[in-house]
Image (spheres, rainbow, N blue to C red):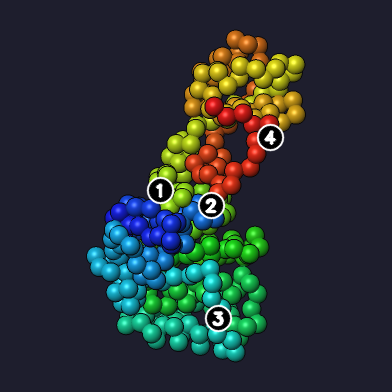
Amino acid sequence: MAFTGAVKAFGPLRAVDGIDLEIHRGETVALLGRNGAGKSTTISLLLGLDDPATGRVELFGGPPEDAVRAGHVGAMLQEGRLVPRVTVRELVSFVAGRYPAPLPVGEALALAGIEDLAGRRVDKLSGGQTQRVRFASALAGNPSLIVLDEPTAALDVEARQEFWASMRSYARRGNTVLFSTHYLEEADRHADRIVVMDHGRIVADGSGEQVKRSAGGNTVSFDLAGHGTRGLTLLPGVASVEVRGDRARLRTTDSDATVVALAELGAIRGLQVTAASLDEAFLALTTPASPPAPLTTETV
């Protein structure tokens, strides 16, 4: 799967702005970005639902629509409802029958963890059960790649855990998974690789740890205990300073140098050094469409 200089514009807006991206067989990749970053448009290009204005998108060495037609690709998109008044088995069987070499229906149900729901009507299912039926339908064509667009949106914690258990069963077979999500902990936990988009471009690409390191390193926090905040932004390695009550949090690219400088100032009460979270990395790497007015955060 490869994007080469892919561009997709809607009027003056470049939703996808010249991205280059290659995903290899067997990878589980999370696609992250704020609303409007270009994730859904990227997925549409990948599935052949849209064509790039310039550049190229290839799946399994050819046009995306050929790969989809051959059953090499399965997808769960955000929109779309299940056909009512049919059973789960009937629905998955119907979908499987549209492909040249489908997965046996019982196997698709087992992979999705819904064998016990086979005889239930799809319009009588809970939200989590419905999502797993959609997953089984996406598996029905026996795809080598599955694309999941916000697959756990609106699901409760238990349903999300059940869904990802099903997805891991599919991935363990050596298949490729590309998913977008707003639940950053899901990306950190389930993805081998994280791709972050912002304003139609890729701004980070690597493992969770690599993405965290690329966004500014660690956080050093300490109790102010009467010390002022003046000069904190000038300390070695400090990228930003945030004050909450009587506690300061310094995002730093060199936590050792920052701690030594704080010790020289005598500002080490309640000192704590923590690795950047994926949430912090994501916020550092991306820009909201309309940035909020700064409160108590000072950035250098």
Taking the image as shown, residue 124 lies to the left or right of residue 199, namely right
Few, some or many C-alpha atoms within 10 Å of disc 4 (few <14, some 14-19, many ≥20)?
few
Q: Nearer the viewer, mark 4 or mark 1?
A: 4
The residue labelled by disc 2 is 34
Q: Secondary structure at mark 4?
A: loop
Image position, residue 189 (x, y; %): 52, 50
- Cα–Cα span, label 4 and label 1: 29 Å
Q: Quadrant of the C terminus?
A: top right
**Three-letter code for the amino acid on which mark 2 is drawn:** Arg
The residue labelled by disc 4 is 295
Q: Nearer the viewer, mark 4 or mark 3?
A: 4
Q: Nearer the viewer, mark 2 or mark 4?
A: 4
Dividing the picture into quadrants, the one containing residue 46 is bottom left
Taking the image as shown, residue 250 lies to the left or right of residue 47, namely right
Would residue 300 be seen by someone viewing this image from the given angle? yes
- Cα–Cα span, label 2 and label 1: 12 Å
- Cα–Cα span, label 4 and label 3: 46 Å
Dividing the picture into quadrants, the one containing residue 183 is bottom right
The residue labelled by disc 1 is 202
Image position, residue 14 (x, y; %): 42, 55
Image position, residue 51 (x, y; %): 34, 67
**Three-letter code for the amino acid on which mark 3 is drawn:** Leu
The residue labelled by disc 3 is 82
- Cα–Cα span, label 2 and label 4: 21 Å
Q: Quadrant of the N terminus?
A: bottom left
Compared with 54, 88 (above or below) is below
